[in-house]
Amino acid sequence: MILHSSITGSGKPFLILHGFLGMGDNWKTLANQFAESGYEMHLVDQRNHGRSFHSDTFNYEVLADDLKAYCDEHELTDVILLGHSMGGKTAMLFAMRYPELLEKLVIADIAPKYYAPHHQTILEGLNALSENEEARKSRGDADAFLEKYIADWGTRQFLLKNLYWQKDKTLALRVNLPVLTNKVEAIGEGLPTQTVYEGETLFLNGLKSDYITKEDTALIQAHFPNSEVIGIPDAGHWLHAENPKDFYAEVMKFLG
């Protein structure tokens, strides 16, 4: 099965991989900007997310292989690949396995290290929402219900993009919630030791985020010797949404 994507623009292929519980559509605004600068943008939904297929198997090995199958299907080579958070981990492993397909790699706010599970409250809220039909009568109802679990408005709006209308006029979640809940440990996995990608790589981190720390620099250099790490001011983990202007500028500078 081939991953679902939204493709805009023409020129050099530029693929974007979203984070956990996200979808390609989260990147639509920035993708339009990149398309105007001469890139063919591919906003890819990873398996168990967005409009892509659901599967009981979920780990970075299969996510990287899904992307390889996508590139083969669309006959893509010399691609620009950008991955955020979970998508960044997929992009890193893809680069290790299939370096011949890449021209440049951009990783947004994630390091190659192991992260302990930290999505439990979000998953608890989404599972409760999926079990409560009354809370899925409208987006406003769903938002009010989720607020009991997730105080941050921006995080809730990001998650609520997963909702879509069913034929019975109730809302449902596009993500494969049972599998993602069961496999959440897999999201934190680090890159295999002693894997190296020699190509040009840019790591961007939100200066208000703690996903990439100064202590991670040595590990990043060990896996990506031809890389640099640049901080995006006034931005946390969703740096592309919180400071899109600087994010876009740094990526364009890197792409030359």
Image (tube, rainbow, N blue to C red):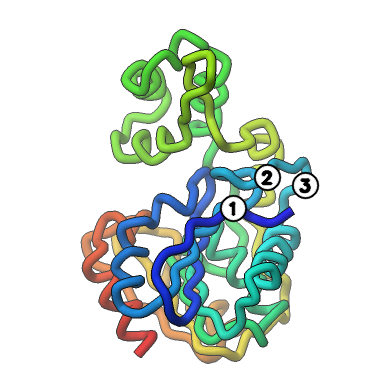
Tags 2 and 1 in contact by the CB under 8 Å rule? yes
Rounded to the nearest angstrom, the CA distance separating label 2 from label 1 is 8 Å
Quadrant in the rendering for residue 192: bottom right
Image location (x, y in percent) of residue 229: 40, 79
Question: Amino acid under label 3?
Answer: Thr
Question: Tag 1, which secondary structure?
Answer: loop
Image location (x, y in percent) of residue 141: 36, 16
Question: Tag 3, which secondary structure?
Answer: loop
Q: Classify residue 250 as left or right of residue 119.
A: left
Measuring 63% from the left and 70% from the top, which residue is drawn there? 74
- Above or below, 236 relative to 53: below
Residue denoted by label 3: 57
Measuring 35% from the left and 90% from the top, which residue is drawn there? 256
Query: Is residue 229 visible to us here?
Result: yes
Query: Is residue 237 visible to us here?
Result: no
Measuring 35% from the left and 79% from the top, which residue is drawn there? 38
Residue denoted by label 1: 4
Q: Residues within 10 Å of mark 1 (few under 14, many from 20)?
A: some
